[in-house]
Image (cartoon, rainbow, N blue to C red):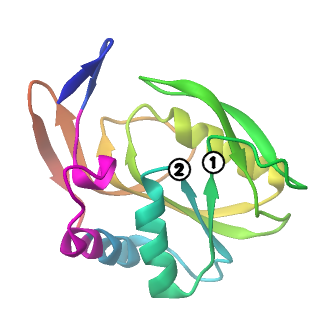
């Protein structure tokens, strides 16, 4: 755990890619998500840069569902949706491309903590006209409200250490 201002930030291979992402751990996370996600009729997997990319890539490969990434910089492509994001330790603009009106999507990400990034992504998907079928996080920290139900594989508390307080599988 490290402090970023007033925010106690925890470090883990799934959430930060350090010190190394073990393939067995990544496979376990993705297999867990496959067990809990509703993928029926889903057109696209949506992830957030950066640490959702490895999870989404593996899920996309396992399911043959295309993936798109909400980015931290604009690409100025037709239909790009820009939204503002505020988390416990950062803020800025996020940019969504590759979503069409009527797309049915699932969102996967490494962690939900404050909910700020996910609220921004959900707003962008609403603007784009997508239907969010399901949302799943590898790790849930606390009980953030993202404006809709979601699933997680584990729930943690961060004090001076990180404690797993609930496993959902």
Q: Is residue 122 left or right of residue 12?
A: right
Give yes or no for residue 18 being in the magenta stretch.
Answer: yes
Residue 27 lies, in percent from the top left, at 28, 76
Q: Nearer the viewer, residue 127 or 67?
A: 67
Apparent side of residue 138 relative to residue 45 in the rendered image (left or right): left
Cα–Cα span, label 1 and label 2: 5 Å
Residue plotted at (35% across, 78% down): 35
Query: Which segment did they paint magenta?
Result: 10-28
Marks 1 and 2: CB-CB under 8 Å?
yes
Whether residue 76 is visible, yes or no, is yes
Tell me where residue 151 appears, x and y as whole percent: 40, 57
Choose top left, top right, bottom left or bottom right for residue 131. Answer: bottom right
Q: Which residue position is annotated with label 1?
A: 71
| Residues packed near mark 2 inside 10 Å, few (<14), some (14 to 19) or many (20 plus) | some
Quickly name the residue at label 2. 49
Q: Secondary structure at mark 2?
A: loop
Q: Is residue 148 above or below residue 20?
A: above
Residue furthest right as drawn: 78
Residue 149 drawn at (x, y percent): 50, 51
In x, y percent, where is residue 88? 42, 23
Residue depicted at 41% across the width and 66% down the height = 55
User: Would you call the spot at circle 1 few (<14 residues within 10 Å), some (14-19), or many (20 or more)?
Assistant: some
On the question of residue 147 being in view, the answer is: no
- State the mark number for residue 97: none
């Amino acid at each position: 755990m490290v402090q970023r201002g007033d925010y106690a930030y925890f470090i883990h291979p799934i959430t930060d890619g350090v010190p190394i992402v073990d393939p067995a751990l990544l496979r376990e996370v993705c297999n867990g998500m496959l067990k809990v996600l509703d993928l029926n009729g889903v057109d696209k997997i949506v992830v957030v840069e950066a640490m959702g990319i490895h999870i989404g890539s593996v899920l996309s490969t396992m399911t043959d569902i295309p993936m798109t990434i909400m980015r931290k910089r604009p690409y100025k492509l037709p239909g790009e949706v820009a939204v503002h994001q505020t988390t416990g330790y950062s803020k800025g603009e996020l940019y969504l491309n590759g979503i069409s009106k009527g797309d049915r999507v699932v969102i996967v990400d490494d962690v939900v903590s404050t909910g700020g990034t996910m609220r921004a992504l959900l707003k962008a998907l609403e603007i784009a006209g997508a239907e969010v079928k399901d949302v799943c996080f590898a790790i849930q920290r606390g009980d953030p409200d993202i404006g809709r139900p979601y699933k997680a594989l584990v729930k943690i508390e961060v004090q001076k250490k990180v404690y797993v307080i609930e496993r959902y599988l």
